Amino acid sequence: DAEITQSPRHKITETGRQVTLACHQTWNHNNMFWYRQDLGHGLRLIHYSYGVQDTNKGEVSDGYSVSRSNTEDLPLTLESAASSQTSVYFCASRSSTGNTIYFGEGSWLTVV
Amino acid sequence: QKEVEQDPGPLSVPEGAIVSLNCTYSNSAFQYFMWYRQYSRKGPELLMYTYSSGNKEDGRFTAQVDKSSKYISLFIRDSQPSDSATYLCAMSAAGNQFYFGTGTSLTVIP
């Protein structure tokens, strides 16, 4: 079955370190998204991509970056991790013609 | 004002009860409506998808959209302990950007 996988599932890192969260989907979806989920805020969009070489900022993009070199992958990089970036991160994807998005299982990140 | 408002609960019901979960929204351009179920420490899982107004039924689940009132509902009949989860509503205008409620936590007590 096609799926969307995230790695690592859990990570603890130190303030100031660079961290990359991987997202890989096998649906051949053009649209991919990164969200963070925090209590009281729900899901907030960090970055999104509508295709290879396309990236766009979401509502909470400061301190994060993404790159899209192929259809399957959208890695999320925290340039210099901060304690405020402790959260659970979800990758999602959507086909160009579909109207729903599908989520990965999440990456739990703790910045100490 | 948030685009989508959802009562966070928590909601606790006995097994077999009918559960009603609701969201309101402000953007009249929304036409795609979704409900996601999220178990603890898992990703959101698409439960129901509805286009425009009306009802959609899938087993014990019914999704209802009232565009005139900007109000959507998810009904769960004969609720089971396995339905205990957080339920997120989501909506979209053109299918590109999605707007989520903050989720309602549901516990079904055996």
Image: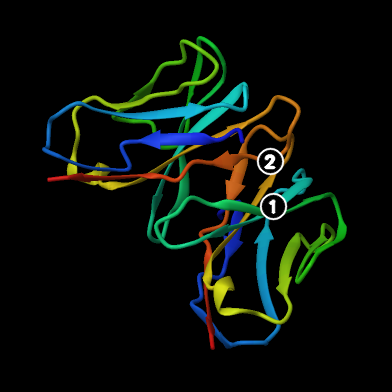
Which is nearer the eye, A76 or B110? B110
Q: Chain of mark 2?
A: A
Report crowding for label 2: few under 14, some 14 to 19, many 20 or more residues within 10 A (C-alpha).
many
**Tag 1: amino acid:** Met
Query: Which corner quadrant of the image does residue A96 belong to?
Result: top right
Q: Is residue B30 above or below residue B88?
A: above
Q: Quadrant where the N terminus of chain A lies?
A: top right
**SS at mark 2 in the image:** loop
Residue A45 numbered mark, or none = none
Q: Chain of mark 1?
A: B
Which is nearer the eye, B99 or A108? A108
Residue visible at 60% across and 33% down? Answer: A2
Q: Which residue is mark 2?
A: A100
Query: Which corner quadrant of the image does residue B22 belong to?
Result: bottom right
Q: In the visual, does A16 lie left or right of B47?
A: left
Q: Is residue B41 above or below residue B109?
A: above
**Tag 2: amino acid:** Thr
Say if labels 1 and 2 share a chain. Answer: no
Report crowding for label 1: few under 14, some 14 to 19, many 20 or more residues within 10 A (C-alpha).
many
The answer to whether the residue labelled 1 contacts the one labelled 2, judged by CB atoms less than 8 Å apart, is: yes
Residue visible at 19% across and 34% down? Answer: A81
Where residue A62 appears, as percent x and y from the top left, is 33, 30
Q: Which residue is mark 1?
A: B34
**SS at mark 1 in the image:** strand
Q: In the visual, does A42 lie left or right of B94?
A: left
